[in-house]
Image (cartoon, helix red, strand yellow):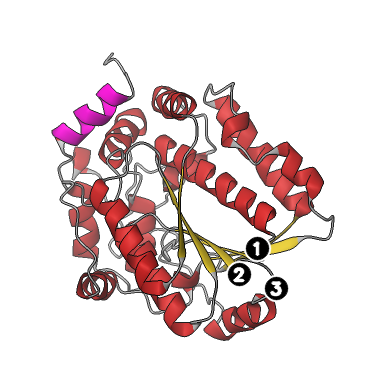
Amino acid sequence: MRNNRIRCKKCILDSATPGIILNPATGLCQYCEQEPVVVPKSEELHQILNGSRGKKEFDAIFALSGGKDSCYTLHHLKNLYPDLRILAVQFDNGFISNIAVNNAKRFCRMTESTYLSLTTDPVILSTAFRRAAESTNGYPLISRIRASDICNTCIGIVKQKLLGLALIHQAPLVVFAFSPGQTTNPYIRLNLSSIQWFRNLFQKELQAIGVTNCDELLIGKDLLTQVAPKFELIMAHPLLIWDYDKKRIEQECIDLGWRYPDLGDRNSTNCLLNAYAIDNHIKKYGIHPYAFDLAALVRGGHLSREEAISSVDADLSPTLIRYARDKLQITLK
């Protein structure tokens, strides 16, 4: 454990994480002392899909990273709703492993989903990641606790791109394979005004970390003027309402032909940038960017405390860190 920090006795959050308070009497953090959150049942997803299927070219825009969670979610979704027309989008951030690309394409063929590899200007993208690495306190505190500055930047861009595709195709559903540790909202309903607000918020966050040329990374302004004012969509996170078991999900994916990329990263099965993002975040803020999410999985009974501790205490690959740093042209200070 870094610096002999005191960890919550139930999950893995420690006393050095901003906002975390450990009760001296119980040894528990405030989250473990709260009542568990009750999430909606799968019937609501069924109602949402029944009300949206078959009206447009695509019923759903799906974020497909090529990692095990997204591949499993795509496969399970199609098993439950075989006629669902899905545009599966793999965002190429310049650091996606070849195995992750092959995994994504394999599961698209298997589920008869339309595969789309999407990227943006590589210079602008690399600049955004470099600014994120060099910035401090650009993102709000709650964002910095839940993810690294680099991951917040990348995920923010992915959301903008997928929402843009939903506007183009008038798709009523955007699906992410976020785990119960990564979000607490199974469904987020968005109308045109809230999508505009979402764009403006992310633009301000990009500017806060020093990204000035950011239009390429945001939802196109022209799209917002071309869509009917009454347009609405739902952002769904199905893993929050299904039985989430990391080991079972991984084994099911392997049985279906998913290959485990040997990245030397305990926290990612698709991205070559992740190890550097973690290292950069720990050095800037002294906290592991996955601890908050893993702690939530422990509290929900989805992961053992020992497995979570093993993940956050695992050594990071010097090779991956050096590779990402060199590719982003970041000079050590």
At a point 55% along the width and 69% down the height, the residue shown is 186
Instruction: Return the x and y of residue 300 as percentages of the image width and height.
Output: 38, 72
Which span of residues is magenta-colored?
Answer: 319-327
Relative to 249, say whether 63 is above or below: above
User: In this orientation, does residue 27 appear?
Assistant: no
Instruction: Return the x and y of residue 247 as percentages of the image width and height.
Output: 23, 71
Relative to 84, say whether 182 is above or below: above
At a point 51% along the width and 66% down the height, the residue shown is 237
Q: Are marks 2 and 1 in contact (CB under 8 Å)?
A: yes
Q: Are marks 3 and 2 in contact (CB under 8 Å)?
A: yes
To which residue does mark 3 refer? 55
To which residue does mark 1 refer? 171
Quadrant for the C terminus in the image:
top left
CA–CA distance in space, label 2 to label 1: 6 Å
Majority secondary structure in the magenta region: helix
Give the crowd class for mark 2: few <14, some 14-19, many >=20 residues within 10 Å: many
To which residue does mark 2 refer? 59
